[in-house]
Amino acid sequence: QVQLVESGGGLVQAGGSLRLSCAASGRIFSNYAMGWFRQAPGKEREFVAAISWTGGSTYYADSVKGRFTISRNNARNTVYLQMNSLKPEDTAVYYCAAAPRRVVVPRALSDFDSWGQGTQVTVSS
């Protein structure tokens, strides 16, 4: 497994932006497809975005499509989530996750075998 540490969360007003980062260590980062999930209080963890190990393929949940962008820098062992036009309903703990690269663009929880500790994102109205 790979170790993952998220950063970049915080409090922002509706319409604002945040960029989350997830630093990986312990394994060869390019061996992994990467994803972001989120979990709001009282709700199940839900898929947000994913990116293939090359960065050439991405996939987004409908709720964030057009507002969020996932990217990666394999030289820096880091994956990012740029979040624009934030809404109060985007408030959640955001988790970074890694999946074996044979899963080209993972989306299900079960596709991922390594998780970060999460970073809180709060969007005020």
Image: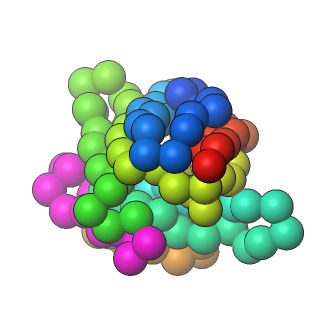
Coloring scheme used: rainbow
- 64 or 74: nearer the viewer: 64
The percent position of residue 88, horizontal first and vertical second, equals: 60, 55
- In the rendered structure, the answer to whether residue 8 lies left or right of residue 57 reads right
Q: What residue appears at the point 82 percent right and 61 percent down from the top-left corner?
A: 41
Residue 25: x and y in percent read 51, 28
Q: Is the magenta stretch mostly helix, strand or loop?
A: loop
Residue for point 26% across, 62% down: 66
Query: Is residue 99 in view?
Result: no
The quarter of the picture where residue 76 lies is: top left
From the top left corner, tell me how far across and down residue 114 is, in percent.
60, 51
Residue 52 position in % (x across, y down): 27, 58
Q: In this view, does 3 lie to the left or right of 60?
A: right
Q: Which of 34 and 38 is in front in this view?
A: 38
| Residue nearest the viewer, comparing 72 with 48 | 48
Q: Residue drawn 54% across and 28% down? A: 8
Q: Which residue lies furthest to the front in this view?
A: 125
- Give the residue at x 52% y 55%: 87
Range of residues picked out in magenta: 52-63
